[in-house]
Image: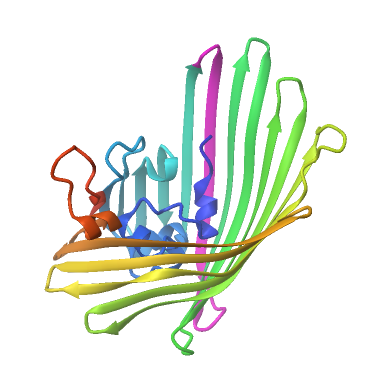
Amino acid sequence: MRKVLIVLALLAVVSFASDPRLAVLGGDARLLVNDYLEMWAYPGIIGDYEFITGSSETAGSDSDGWFGIVDGLGGNAYGVTINHNNYSHEILFSPGGWGAILSMDFDKYPEEDETVKEMAVGLAWGTDVPFLADYSDLAFAAGFDKETRDLEDDEFCNSNMMFGASLRGHGDDFFNLFPIISAGFNSHTVDDYDDSSISTTTINFDFGAGRNKKVGDKTNLILGVFGALQSTSHSGDYAEGATPDAEMSIDLPRVSGGVEQEIGKWLVFRAGAVSTSTYYKSGDFNQFTHDFETNFGVGLHWDNFIMDATISEGFLHDGPYMVGGNDNGFMGSLAATYNF
């Protein structure tokens, strides 16, 4: 089932990781500044960018990337995307001072003896407010998606309703950090063929600080440190005594980011990582885990034209596969952007 990812983007999961630069530099759009991808985390800045872009994911991927354009006309900014975040279309608009993104998708197809319908709609809105240091980017988002399966006179329904909000401060002189606070709510409901219904409710909250700054003439640093809490509860027509236990997970800390190093006039090398320490509890079960992931990539710049790509760690260690037809991991994900 396709999810309403525009809401999840405000909660900093890596829903935009299909873009090579963002994927390498930690996968959190809230940490980006002076990059058009930040507008999906904070739509109030849509009017700051005019661009045309196309992105291709790893060869053989079903979605195979996306295309988008944002341009100004009569003092307003207008934009459209195709196949972005698993939506067939997004419409972007900003008259200045605020911005909004409307996301839509609909599919209908046969599957064995069933007819499957999937629909999703999301709306994100943002502006800036005089709060947290000099000013802050504020964003709200809501989304709904639904999957139905019709089998003769019976119907199965799987739906999600989501809300999210995020606030990012600017201008703090204390180590040039900008505070970030995000929260979200998700309600997942399944109505089965036999008229039974179960629901899962998830609440997310995270807070932290980020830095995006040139630390040298040719070196750019992106860094975010967060604490996060997620709580999940279950209800509905479970058998007596079979309702799943409530779940809770705490990330303390989650660290993400990376570094960009200019090499010559047209080449940028990137390296980034995400480190997450998580405590998880469900009923009497609890555990503490640690995950760590590294990413590498390059950027090629010619005036207003930019080409970004990812490089797999295996390629850096072992080089390309010369025989056998295996993917060598060089430029596995690729994006080309022209800024007007």
Assess whether residue 221 is covered by the magenta stretch. no
Point 76% across, 44% down: residue: 234
Number of labels in the image equals: 0
Q: Which residues are magenta?
A: 111-136
Above or below: residue 1 compared with residue 310: above
Q: Is residue 174 above or below residue 329?
A: below
Task: Single out the residue that lies furthest toward the bottom.
Answer: 174
State the quadrant of the C terminus.
Answer: bottom left
Asked if one can make out residue 186 in the rendered structure from this viewpoint, the answer is yes
Q: Is residue 292 left or right of residue 261?
A: right
- The residue located at (23%, 40%) in the rendering is 326
Any part of residue 95 in sight: no
In front of the other: 46 or 146:
146
* Residue drawn where x is 27% and y is 40% of the image: 59
- Residue 235 picture location, percent across and down: 79, 41
Residue 280 is situated, as x and y percent measured from the top left of the image, at 67, 58
| Dominant secondary structure (helix, strand or loop) of the stretch shown in magenta | strand
Closer to the camera, 8 or 221?
A: 221
Measured as percent of width and height from the top left, residue 154 is found at: 68, 15
Residue occupying image coordinates x 64% and y 43%: 161
**Left or right of residue 308, residue 4 in this image:** right
